[in-house]
Structures are given as C-alpha cells and as structure tokens.
Amino acid sequence: MKKSANVAQRDRIVPAAADDGSEKEEYWMKALVAVKRVVDYNVRIRVKADNSGVETANVKFSANPFDEIAVEEAVRLKEAGVVSEIVVISIGPAAAQEVLRSALALGADRAILVQSEDEVEPLAVAKILKALCEREAPQLAILGKQAIDDDSNQTGQSLAALLGWPQGTFASKLVISDGRAEVTREVDGGLETVSLALPAVVTTDLRLNEPRYASLPNIMKARKKTLEIIPAAELGLDIAPRLTTLRVEAPPKRAAGVKVANVAALVDKLKNEAKVI
Amino acid sequence: MASYKAPLRDMRFVLFELMGGDDIASLPGYEEFTRDLIDPVLEEAAKLCEQVLHPLNRSGDEEGCTFENGVVRTPKGFIDAYRQFREGGWTSIACDPEYGGQGLPKAVDTLIVEMICSANLSFSLYPGLTQGAYVALHGFGSDALKQTYLPKMVEGTWSGTMCLTEPHCGTDLGLLRTRAVPQDDGSYKITGTKIFISAGEHDLTENIIHLVLARLPGAPKGTKGISMFLAPKYLVNEDGSPGPRNGVACGSIEHKMGIKASSTCVMNFDGAKGWLVGEPGKGMRAMFAMMNAERLAVGMQGLGVAEASYQGAVAYARERLQGRSLSGAKHPEKSADPIIVHPDVRRMLLTQRAYAEGCRALAAWAARSLDLESRHPDPEVRREAEDFVALVTPVVKAMMTDLGSEAANLGMQVLGGHGYIREHGMEQYVRDCRIAQIYEGTNGIQALDLVGRKLPANAGRLLRRFFHPVSDYIEAKNDDKALREFVEPLGKAFTRLQQATGAVARAGLRNPEEAGAAATDYLRLFGLTALAYLWTRMAEISLPKVGDADSDGFYVAKVATARFYMQRLLPQTGALFASIMAGGKSMMAFEEAAF
C-alpha cells in the first residue's frame, strides 16, 4: 500500500463539467465511512449456557445505528457537492457484506470488507482503518461514536491518534468548508464546537441526522457497485485481541425496593450493602 | 400497544424452504432475483412498514379522512408517508419495467403486500387500488393510453381507482346505468354515479386516474353491454402534466366501521371526458383481470391483520398477570401467572398463529404459480399454473379473510376488557378487516365462483391441479413414520373433500340451488384441506432441522404449530362435510313468509 502525501491529495483537482458546459476544476474529496455489523438493537440478548458469551446464532444482525448515521452524513455531503466519493468499510465475517450492501444502497460508491471471523477489538480496527486510510487517502473518516454491542467508544479516537489527524467526536453537526471541518460536539456540559483541519476523523452522535430509507431502485443498483474483500491477515498487522473474556453473566434480576426508616439507615445500606459509598 | 414487526424469518422459510424460491432466478426475466437481492428488499420494506406506516395506524383510525367542498384530506402524516413510500420506489415494485416498474416476482411482492397490510391497512388501499387500475390498463389499454398514464401511475405520482359499484348494483354489475357517449374526437362523455370507490379522492397525488365501467348507447342489457373507460381527475396536457379539471368529482365520503383513513367515495361523473379501454362490450373481461389480482391482494389483507393481531395478543399474554395456572402456580414469585399459561389463552393464540402461518404458505403457493404462469418457458407449466391460480383465487380471498376476521376477534379476546379499548389497537384490527370479507366480491360470491365456475371448468381440469399433487404426496408419504401424525389426518380431510366434491357436483347438476347451498361450507373444507397439506409439508421440512441447528427454536415451533393445526383445527372438516352432505333442503324449503 502506497503512502500518499496528504497535502498533494488535498489539493487534488480534477476536471469537471460546469453548468454552462465549459470545463471547470473541482476538489476530489473522498470520505471513508466505517460500518460494523452488530446484533440488532431490538433483539433480546441471551447469555450462552456456558457463560462464554452471548447467543448470536440465528439472531438478527444489522448495521450499527451510529454507523448508519455516519453513512447518511457522508451521503448528504455528497449530495451537497462537498464529497465526491464515499468508500464504506466493514471489518468482520463474510456476513458483514450485508451491511456494506445496505450502505451502497443508501448512496456509498464502493465497499471494502476486511474479512475476519475472529473478534477484532477497537485498537485493531483502528489499525486496519489506518492502513486503509493510507491506501485510499480520504479527507474525512466518519465513524459511529461507538458500537452498540460493546459500547467501547474508542475506535474513532484511536484512529485519529494513529494517523496523527485531528478528531471531532460525538458530532451533532458537521460543516465542511475551505479545507476545514467544523464539528459541534455533544459533551456533558452542553455543546462544544471545534474547527479541524482536514483530513480529520469525525464520530457521529444520535442527533447528527436521521438516516433515510433505501429506495428499491437503489437496493437493486447497489449490487452492481464494487465490493472488495481483503482477508484481514493480508494486511500484515498485529490485530490479535488484547483482552480475554473470562465469563459473561446476565445482570441480576431487579429485586424489590426497600423502604428505609431514616437517613442513617439509608447511608448504612448504601455503604455496607450496595457498597457505592 | 405492541408494535408490529414483520415476520421475516417465517417469510423467508415459506419463500425459500417451502416454495423453493431459490429457483425464481432461473425464470426468464427474473435472473436478478437471487436471495442476496430479495433479502435486503424484504428488510427495507419491513423497516418502512414498521417505522413509517405502522405509527400512523392508530392516529389514522382516530382522525379518519375529512371531506369539505369536494376536497378529501387524508389524516395527518399520510401525505408524508405516501411521499416516502413513493420515493422509495415501493409503488412500482411489481410493475412492468417498460413503464418504470421494478418487475419484482410476485413471490416477493406478496410478502411486501402482507407487511403493508399488517402495518396500516387503510394506507395499503391507496397504492393497492392504483395497482388494480394498472393491471386493467396494462392488460387492455391501447399503447397511446398506456404511454400517457402508466408511467406516472407506476411511479406513484398519479394514483388510480376502479369505479364499478353503483347505488343499486354491486354484485350484479349487469344492472349498471353509467353511460358513455362517443364524441367526434374519439373520446367519450361519461355520466353516472359510482359509490364505495376507495381512494376516489384524496390529497396524496397530483392526479387520479379513474377506470370506469359504463354502457355505450345501444349496448345490450346485462354484462355483455359493459365497456371500460379511463377518465382522469385532471385532463393531461400535451407535455404530460395535469391540465384542466375533468367532470368527475367526489360527492361525499362514507363513515365506515373500519379502514377509516381510506377515503371511500361517492364519485359523480358529469360528462367527464374519457377514453375506451379495450374493446366495446368487453369491459367485464378487463375488469376481471383486475379483480382476480385484487382478490389475491384482499386475501393478503386478511393474513396481514391476522399476523398483526397475533403479535399484539402474544405480547399482552406474556405480560398480563391474572390468576394461577390450573396445574399450580407457574411463577410463584409473581403476584399472579401471565395469562399465557392458561389453556384457553393458548388455544386462541395458537389458532391465530396456525391460521396466519398456514395462510402465508397458501398465499406463497398462489404467488409462485403467478410467477410460473407469466415466466416459465414451458407452455404446459404455464397453463397448469394459470389453472391453479384461477382455482385457488376464490379460496385465498374468502378463506384468508374469514380466518383473518376470526383471528382478529381472538386477538381482541385475549386482551379481555383492554381489547375493547381503542388505544390498545386490537379492536381496530377487527373493524379494519371486516370489509375484506365483503368487497372485491363477497365471500358468498367467491364460494359460488369456486363451486359454480371453477369446479366444473374444463371437465374438472382446474380441480385436478390441486387434487393430483395432494394425493400424490399423501401416497408418497404413506410409509413415513415421522410424518404419520400429519399425513393421516391430511388423508382423512382430503378424502372428505373428494367425496364432497363429487356430491356437490352431482347435486348441482340436478339442482343449482344445491350447489349454492353447499358452496360456503365447501370452500372452507377445501381451504382447510389445502392448509393441512401445506402444514404437513412444513412439518416435513422442519422435523430434520429440530435439534442443535435450531438455536432459536424456529423449527420446533413450526412442528408444534403444525401439530396443533392438525389436531385442533382440521377436525372442523368433519363437521363441514356433514353439513354439506345434509344438502340444502332445510334452507330452501323454508317458507319465505316465515322469515
């Protein structure tokens, strides 16, 4: 994979047709979007009988909702003429092609599956995405803020650090202009707006947009778009898990509440029973 | 109120495992439709139905349509929902690609129609009526008419209606009075009043294309004198855009028991400009082409409501704590047991489930036959499929709507007092689906069609398209030990059906009123036997898959539902048989004055 000079890529200008039929020049801005195949948010998860994990056989899978928001944002940027090409990437088993086809049906141009049947942790995902960013040279990497299966909230941040790119996480608003991204972030205290030089990493939060429904003609057209499959091992990266799951248990059933006689009794229970203070 | 979730797992089972849907892609013109295209299409349709259409179901029922100064407004949210539906390409799914359609196989389209009916039955009528008008125009219109009107109808920018019924004639269309007078420019002036016109007037599209049955001057009385015409709400300009208003207007809308968000209109044609569709005097033929397609669609309404009601009832039965199980408390830690422990509640739920899943299989069989009829290269296969569709259409329409009504009532019953309360949504299903037993040809008419037209047709040729596969199957599975508990009752029901068929045919020859007296019971006997055959085949497919590979218990449940159907529902065939064999004397000898 070639290492590209980001400066040269940012200024990559291509000939295009202007409205009056003459030639003009346009920025060629590529956006890279990552989509994870996760257990559907509606599914009532059950723990496996041997407590080694959750039951995933015959369970419904979908695209991570925050990643759908990322795809939608990229498509809107393309419709606004800001982004010229959307490459959507998934890292996972062969079945992850479904979420890629969905993204293609929504408006992405090209898809890449980095195929791995084993678990790939956020740091490893970030390493893989870094390698693909070096190959594809996007100006914008848009990720969901976290996956709903592990709630890690690490991948976008790790990717930015590995690439040395600025990051705007928990985006509820994104404006691209003059080679910069203005990201409004949802933080504990309210909203914070940061200005990032491109290329940058943005992670999406719930209020950034409402994803569209794929139209039937687009679902059918999506099958003709390119879906490249790269076996994870081919990238030559160390993506082995750093964590070993020892045991998975269902949370304890909610017990009935208890009425306490006075504040002292409450403090005592909080300290000695619930052990939270 | 439980939210509807499209039963994709069961739909895929029926399409691919029961009906061998992987071979759809081998039919000429359907090469694209492999599983990896069908799956995302079904997923997206499910999303649209669950997230856009279903949330409007209750509110649409409470608000209903409003009529003021000739203008009909649909309930809040419908215009936007229809826009999303149209922009998503869903109005065009089953239409001819030559006019902008997606050309989806019927096998897939049927599943999507079911989802729309479950999610919002009122909404389904707007694209549904357009589809009916499309079928008639596509099959019988001139090229000029088709070019002018079909593309926008397929796209959903214009909608369509079927204007047949008049105040004094519904079933007996031969009595209709609407007149069409030829004009010098080749068009016609149409005058008359039509009633019960679904989607006759609304605010979802910029034009409405009415297909109207009318009589030409000098045309013979009765059905032979009927022609079909096309009259748009707005005349169409040279450039294809809607132009001046035509002489057709909505006089009023009906206040109905159900499907309240569907505008059911009185349409007044006042010298409206129209054009002939097909040949003069051949209007009924064009109408029947549309009607047969619509009859299958109405059957899907029954199925859709049964499924939606079942889902609501199950959710309630799992949560509602009342009383203790008859055999001792099953959840002693709770204040009472969830009502799903009670036998009578299970009876109701399983009845809903067995009917819904069985009817889904029957609809899939009909849909597959439609695809074979239109696409299979072998003309013999096409003819067999055509025969089967003709035979089974009245059964799909009448039985699936009757069972849908029964299921909806059971679902309401499961909720007890809360079932009677509008907010919970269950009584709406009862009200919404009731009309399905009446329109598009009442279920009594369907039964007469089966017994009077389809059974004797071509010396029983249509009938053999059902009888032969079933009897071959029963014979082939004779020695199958695992299937015996299914094949035996199937065989018994089938024998009753054969005997009843012979008896009705013979009695009907001597006295047509005997056939009429037997018709409704016969149709149910036929339909229940068809379901028994399908349940046996579904059990056959599922039995080997029970076990380690069945981690979500789908196949175990399928076999268990089959068992319930065979043991607790199929025995109705014995009673139906007895009724049929008793003959019609007790009804026909009853003095009219004594009623």
Image: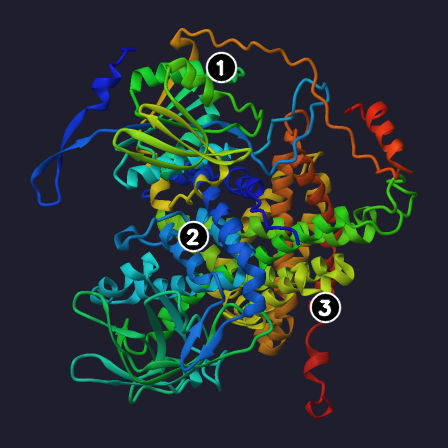
Q: Which residue does the image show at 74% across and 28% down from the upper left?
A: A251
Q: Which residue is mark 1?
A: A123
Q: Return the residue nearer the eye: B508 or B364.
A: B364
Query: Compared to B282, does A108 lie above or below?
Result: above
Q: Which mark is residue B579?
A: 3
Amino acid at the residue labelled 1:
Leu
Q: Nearer the viewer, residue B87 or B361?
A: B87
Residue B526 circle label: none
Q: Is residue B349 above or below residue B401?
A: above
- Measured in 3D between alpha carbons, the distance from the residue under mark 3 to the one under mark 1, in whole angstroms, is 73 Å
- The amino acid at mark 2 is Leu
Where is residue B481, by image quadrant? Answer: top right
2 or 3: mark nearer the eye: 2
**What residue is pinned by disc 2?**
B370
Q: Mark 3 and mark 1, same subunit?
A: no
Mark 3 falls within which chain? B
Cα–Cα gap, marks 1 and 2: 53 Å
Check if mark 2 and mark 3 are on a common chain.
yes
- Please tell me in which quadrant of the rendered image residue B592 appears: bottom right
Find residue B433 and report its horizontal and vertical position in percent: 59, 65
What secondary structure is marked by label 2? Answer: helix
Mark 2 or mark 3, which has the lower sequence index? Answer: 2
Give the label, 1 or 2, closer to the camera. Answer: 1
Percent position of residue B60, x then y: 54, 64
How far apart in space, not on screen, are marks 2 and 3 (Cα)? 33 Å
Determine whether, in the image, residue B274 is placed left or right of residue B26.
Answer: left
